[in-house]
Image (spheres, rainbow, N blue to C red):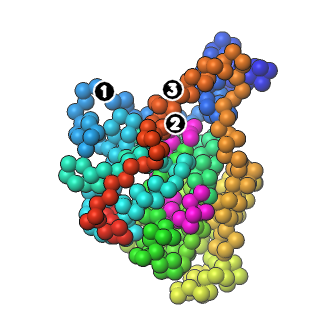
Amino acid sequence: MSQRYETIQKIQASLATTSMSEAIAIEQAAYQIASTQDEYNLACQPTSTPTPSPPQEEVEGDSGIRIGPYGNCRPVSDGVTSEVFRSGDRALKVIVTYQDIEPHNPQREAKILKGLREPCIPLLETFRDQEQRFVLVFPFMPYTLADLLANGPLPLDAVRSIFRDVLHALKDIHAQGIIHRDIKPSAVLLSSPTGPAYLSDFGTAWHPELSIHSEPANAKILDIGTGPYRAIEVLFGHKSYGPEVDMWGVGVMLSEALRDPPTPIFESRAVHEDGNQLGLILSVFKTIGTPTPETWPEAKKFKVAPFELWTVFPARPWEDLLPNVDPDFIDLVSSLLRYDSQRLTAEQVNNNKFIPSEFDEFKKPPKRDNAENDKAGNSDKKDDKQSGFVENKEDGGAKLVEDSEDNEEGGAKL
């Protein structure tokens, strides 16, 4: 209780116009809604960063379209090969392109997702709608990391919490030999501004069994990744890449979250602009220095080596790239954004003291008084149902709809 009282005092001190009773009300509200210690700390921490406005609640009677068994479906976003709709607490990813363009393959995406666990986004079911379009159904998440970063820098507790979940997800998929291949802030979904976070967007993921026929391990497709988050080795045509391309993306994403204002550490032109790949290469070289055979010995085997033909740029000091950032965070980013094979793995980063490794440790709610325990137990069950993460199927798995006419290795581009 003394710790909670100290928190109340800090709230009152940080907000000069706040009375003790208002501070108590703020702390009590945070205590009741928080399901983890991190969420409690964030809810009690005053911050000038504006919170993104959640999507407007659906109004009964809204005129949406019907997609299969789901009514009142309203558009949320769209891409080259898919459109995303919201129906209540569900998100429907509708595949609208029927071309077989690798590495995009929705049938494979569904099979990959079926074998994953949280904090990867759970696939609830798949089906074909009245127009025979393939549809993947997920829990609806109102925020993305991109939304949060667009509103300004994040509190460090939020950075740790969100990236802990992302790295836990990557640790799990990398242990299975899966490479995500499109790490970016918009692929990190959140149920609230403080988390938990879920890794999504597995439409171009590489799987050691499901992808091997169309993409051998030593001849993977190079057209992967998005903008400044693309790994440097892919830009130089290295087709035998592995999970390290995901870790490069995490490094860029983490550097963005630590900067004020949040911006990627590398610059990249839009994909449709000429020279976008060359521009990104030059940005990387100008930022962390042009590689040499000593700093990137593996590149000596590349068909196009990044030596000699390129202007030599010195590396900029990390303290200039990440001003006012804790030195341990700087060490972490610099260990992810390096050329050679010593780039940190997801498992290694999970052991970093700034990204706690024990996932379940932070899923425990704040300690409650004995009188509140029963209430907490009852509300947990209610919250599970409301969140949409409890699957009611007896076997607990996702229902997959297979179509014998679908080409398993050549699905539609997402």
Callout in the foreground (3, 1)? 3
First of labels 3, 1 by sequence position: 1
Asked which secondary structure carries label 2, the reply is loop
Which quadrant: the C terminus?
bottom left
Q: Judge from the rendering whether residue 85 lies leftward or rightward of residue 393; answer left or right.
A: left
Gap in angstroms between the C-alphas marked 2 and 3: 17 Å
User: Which residues fall within the magenta stretch?
Assistant: 172-196
Give the residue at x 73% y 54%.
352
Gap in angstroms between the C-alphas marked 2 and 1: 21 Å
**Extreme right residue here?**
2
Give the residue at x 40% y 57%.
110
**Extreme front residue here?**
394
174 vs 26, nearest the viewer: 174
218 vs 293, nearest the viewer: 218
Callout in the foreground (2, 3)? 3
Residue carrying label 2: 192
How many C-alpha atoms fall within 10 Å of the one at disc 3: few (<14), some, or many (≥20)? few
Amino acid found under the numbered disc labelled 1:
Val
Question: Given contact means CB atoms under 8 Å apart, are the residues at marks 2 and 1 in contact?
Answer: no
Q: Judge from the rendering whether residue 220 lies leftward or rightward of residue 11; answer left or right.
A: left
Q: Is residue 152 above or below residue 332?
A: above
Amino acid found under the numbered disc labelled 2:
Ser
Residue carrying label 3: 382
Residue carrying label 1: 59
Give the residue at x 63% y 65%.
337
153 vs 24, nearest the viewer: 24
